[in-house]
Image (cartoon, rainbow, N blue to C red):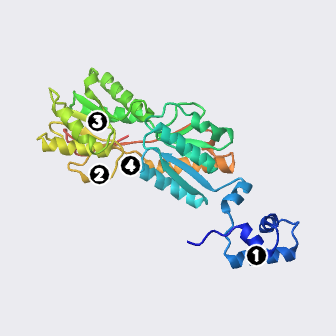
Amino acid sequence: MSKEITIYDIAKETGVSPATVSRALNKHPAVKEKTKKKIYEAADKLGYRSNIFASNLRSKSTHNIGVIVPRLNSPFQSSVLAGMEKVANEAGFNLIISQSLESEDKEKSNAKSMYNSRVDGLLVSLASSTKEIAHFKPFLQKGTPVIFFDRVAEESNMTGVMIDNSKAAYHAVKHLIDQGCKNIVHVLGNPQINVYADRLKGYKYALMDNGIAFEEDNIIISDLNETAGIDISRKILSMNPLPDGLFVSNDSCAASCLIQLKKAGVKIPKDMAVVGFNNDTVSRLIAPNLTTINYPGYEMGEIAMKNLITRLNETGDDVLQNTNTITLKADLIIRDSSLRKKNRNNIHH
């Protein structure tokens, strides 16, 4: 591979100092036109590429926006990123994407890299192990906007884009109760994360409002991936009496549970009604089709990115700019996996 041409190569070729080459390439008025012409011709002949990064530092903008997600292999996060990419692209920005792999240390190192790369703004969905967010403070001190999405920091002065997780979970559990379920298991991720803590609250409120006692044993904390579905199903099958309702905090895990339970002879929804979360593609492919919460990932990505770009452009008249939390609507989509009573009212608002 041929080596990158530098200003020192051009200086050698033209017999002027590297400083003069640098000034000429930056169109400095102190360099004579004749010298500039000689330097431009030499740069062209040698195949010099200007250092965009260096010129971006001078213009105070890189046109890069950093995005930190917990995992890239999540259908939900892919959908969010597609929404972000569309808006960023139209506005002339590039995305630099990294994943924390649910680790606070990795998230800190990602944030540091983004800071050193001088991104114009940062969009973050927090890792499950993140306990404090001091690693994002340098951005704010420098005036670089930081917006959280989905998994949002609790601090009140931070902007976040999310759904009302408590309300969404309440509707999911209330639907199971309306279908005659009285012994409902809830499978969730790390309850230290706002989304899961709020869904657990919604689950508890729905039970309370319908006169059903909360049982600690009916809570299963899990990684919520496809493999976890096997262990969860084993736990559920060992329960006596067998639960008649199951509410899982994402669709791939819910689908995996549904398959395992069916293999074990559990009739869905007659013996056990199942509800997932996110409205991922798998929810429509599995039989019976999975009742789920429609989580508008693409829209969340678009709104988070629009809000960030509005801040960068400092127009000041966008309604989103003055909002700390932007809450999107999430509907319950009722399908066959939970319909023990066949009243086909397909969307619950």
Residue named by callout 4: 74
- Residue drawn at (42%, 50%), measured in percent from left and top? 72
Tell me the mark number nearer the camera, choosing from 1 and 2: 1
- Amino acid under label 4? Ser
Q: Quadrant of the N terminus?
A: bottom right
Disc 1 on helix, strand or loop? helix
Instruction: Name which quarter of the figure residue 64 lies in.
Output: bottom right
Which comes before the other along the chain, label 1 or label 3?
Answer: 1
Q: Is residue 34 above or below residue 218?
A: below
Q: Dots 2 and 3: beta carbons under 8 Å?
A: no
> In this rendering, which labeled residue sits more in front, label 3 or label 4?
4
- Pick the front one: 228 or 75: 228
> Which mark is on residue 13?
1
Looking at the image, tell me whether mark 2 or mark 4 is earlier in sequence order.
Answer: 4
Check disc 1 and give the amino acid type: Glu
The residue lying at 74 percent from left, 67 percent from top is 8
Cα distance, mark 2 to mark 3? 16 Å
Q: Which mark is residue 247?
A: 3
